[in-house]
Amino acid sequence: MSFRFQLEARDGKARAARFCTPHGEVETPVFMPVGTVATVKGMPQDTLEELGVQILLNNTYHLYLRPGVEMIRRLGGVQKFMAWDRPILTDSGGFQVFSLSDLRKVNEEGVQFRSHLDGSSHFFSPESAIAAQIGLGADIIMAFDECTEHPAEYARTKSSMEMTLRWAQRSRKYFEEHKQEVPWFVERGEQTQTLFGIVQGGMFVDLRRESAQRTVEMDFPGYAIGGLSVGEPRSMTYEMVDAAIRFLPEDKPRYLMGVGTPEEIVQYAAQGVDMMDCVLPTRAARHGLLFTSEGRITIKNARYAADETPLDPNCGCKVCARYSRAYLRHLYASNELLAQVLNTIHNLAHYLTTMRGVRQAIARGQFAHLLAQVSPPPATLLTAGHQQRRL
Ligand SMILES: [Zn+2]
């Protein structure tokens, strides 16, 4: 079996589960740090292992442009290339390509786009995006979808969703015909990658439902919810997640793409999401924004210049164990490389600890208690949150 998903506990809508891939096991709910170009910026792989990172996300678009799919295939796949012997997930490249709004043309066949590196012209279709992901060799790969822009009218969102459904069929067909070409097929006992479908449907409840139902009819081993966290109010994100998730099967993983803050990832877990990824903890760290158990800290503030206390007294990470806020502020103010490294270690530790807490709470049936401790949810969530508490 190349992929096995097993539910272990439920608490309200939240679930604790685990899945197996050819490069190891992952416990959910899980937060996946983003390693855009096969590196989590500033983090050596052994540091990620120490932090307990179970699965990383890589971006197909970036690796396709540099160093190129063929190079990574020849080097044994992206796990071997980056010396990371744990699971990896790649996106389809769609999201990056669609963010190049001035540099792309979309039609039924696929997307013509220009490289942000050198302006060279490229084309992604469902078939070529899957071929690229097979060459890279991540354990979990994504169907090629159109991430509908926000805001978008109903008719435009519906036709975009319809195209994503047709592209899902094409992605799946190409994958089934070529999945044995993954670089580690023989080495990993003839296991293959796992292809997830993606639910779109913009900001319309009925389109989210229809997209979920019709994607589920294609019977993928896992489902992503895409096209959210693209500038809409957070209450709408929660509403769209709920609209989609109620039509996704209980016995398959649900992956909400590109979210969120430490408070939000707890809320999404409460809605029944199993997997999340976001650049926020790593990007914010590089800009000196640190997430702690007591709220956010902008480390460059002068008030920390003589502060001898640790960044977060409740954090067990090696940065908080050793360094003072005064030193971290000095490193940041001096534009030292170590500032980015230490800040990133702490922010990732905070996210991973948050998720570990979520898993434990679900397993013990105490998730409602944990949910109540995170910052107050937006007013629109209060009703849903209340229902999730199994009262
Ligand atoms: Zn820390």
Image (cartoon, grey):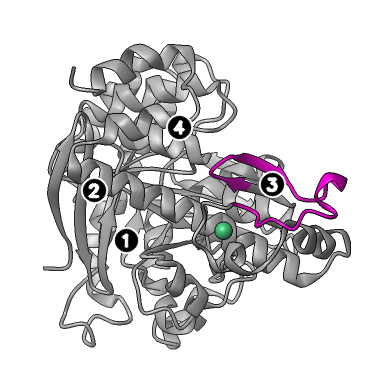
CA gap, disc 3 and disc 4: 40 Å
The type of residue carrying mark 2 is Gly
Task: Count residues near mark 4 (Cα–Cα under 10 Å), then give few for <14, some for 14-19, many for 20+.
Answer: some
The disc label shown at residue 103, or none: 3
* Residue at 38%, 64% in the rendered image: 55
Q: Which residues are magenta?
A: 291-312
Between discs 2 and 4, the one toward the N terminus: 2
Q: Residues within 10 Å of mark 2 (few under 14, many from 20)?
A: many
Find out whether the residues at labels 2 and 1 contact each other: C-beta distance under 8 Å: yes
The C terminus is located in which quarter? top left
Find the distance from the CA under tag 4 to the CA under tag 1.
Answer: 30 Å
Alpha carbons under labels 3 and 2: distance apart: 31 Å
Q: Gap between marks 2 and 4, in whole Å?
A: 28 Å
Q: Is 170 left or right of 114, judged from the image as shown? A: left
User: Mark 4 highlights which residue?
Assistant: 374
The mark closer to the camera, 3 or 4, is 4
